Image (cartoon, helix red, strand yellow):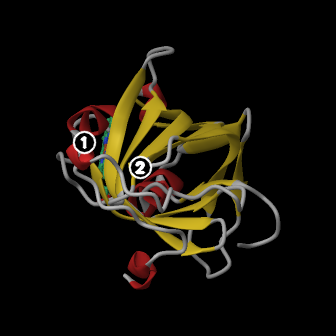
């Protein structure tokens, strides 16, 4: 884990960032707990959403973040707001990333993803795929299941999915952190 900063690091979708960057009036802002982290490899950088809370229920973790990232362009016709993300994932790595959308306080699932432990306190989200409501957030230009960029999740080190087996009815396989899935 880099430093002691906890949060969610995500470049959303590099081609979308490029699209905004090349637009004459394209704008991107990160406020209220989000900031833009410059790229270390010449890419478009990433956004960091600060960690708000983590709820570890043993077989399910819910991490809430604060921050408001907005994209605009095409003289106001394009407006995308991704705010206060919430990431829930289970011991099998099935994750859902939800955000407060453009139209108010309600949360909508933005993407489904696979979450795996990488190193102490650090988790990675891969196979990030847009949901139906996520497609709507991007004007329907990207279809459902459109691949989005991988993300990195830095949580306080003690947070880990329980190694206790879940009740048989739960249907999920327990995974310790760091796990055998970390090499994927
Ligand atoms: C005046 C209205 C608009 C015009 C003229 C326009 C034009 C374009 C063009 C030409 C591209 C292709 C860019 C490229 O391949 O380099 C594109 C891509 C795209 N547009 Fe728009 N657009 C408009 C409005 C919108 C709106 C309202 C949204 C909603 C979010 C949107 C979302 C996107 C997305 C997500 C892409 C794909 C970016 C990528 O990943 O390559 N556009 N648009």
- Quarter-wise, where is residue 27 in the image? top right
For label 2, the SS is: strand
Q: 42 or 85, which lies in front?
A: 85
Secondary structure category for the residue under label 1: loop
The residue that mark 2 highlights is: 89
Task: From this view, report whether residue 101 is shown above or below residue 114.
Answer: above
Q: Is mark 1 within 8 Å of ligand 1?
A: no
Quadrant assignment for the N terminus: bottom right
Q: Quadrant of the C terminus?
A: bottom left
Nearest to N terminus: mark 2 or mark 1: 2
Q: Nearer the viewer, residue 23 or 160?
A: 160
Q: Residue at x 66, y 72 (%)?
A: 120
Seen in the image, is 173 located left or right of residue 89? left
Q: Which mark is residue 60?
A: none
Question: What residue is shown at x 44% (from left), y 26% (from top)?
Answer: 101
Q: Is residue 125 above or below residue 50?
A: below
Left or right: 33 as drawn, with respect to 135? right
Residue 43 in the image: x percent, y percent?
A: 56, 74
- Mark whose residue sits in front, 2 or 1: 2
Residue with the mark numbered 1: 131
Mark pair 2, 1: CA separation: 16 Å
Residue 135 position, x and y percent, is 25, 39
């Amino acid at each position: 884990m880099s430093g002691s900063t906890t949060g969610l690091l995500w470049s959303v979708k590099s081609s979308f960032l490029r699209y905004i960057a090349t637009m004459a009036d394209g704008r991107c802002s990160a406020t209220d707990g989000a900031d833009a982290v410059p790229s270390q490899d010449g890419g478009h950088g990433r956004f960091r959403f600060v960690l708000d809370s983590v709820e570890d229920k043993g077989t399910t973790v819910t991490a809430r973040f604060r921050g408001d990232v907005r994209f605009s362009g095409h003289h106001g016709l394009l407006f995308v707001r991704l705010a206060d993300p919430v990431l829930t994932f289970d011991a099998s790595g099935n994750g859902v990333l939800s955000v407060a959308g453009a139209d108010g306080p309600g949360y909508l699932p933005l993407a489904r993803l696979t979450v795996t432990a990488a190193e102490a306190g650090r988790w990675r989200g891969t196979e990030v795929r847009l949901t139906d409501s996520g497609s709507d957030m991007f004007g329907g230009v990207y279809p459902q299941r459109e691949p989005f960029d991988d993300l990195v999740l830095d949580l306080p080190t003690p947070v880990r999915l329980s190694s206790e087996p879940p009740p048989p009815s739960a249907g999920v396989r327990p995974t310790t952190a760091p796990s055998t899935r970390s090499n994927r």
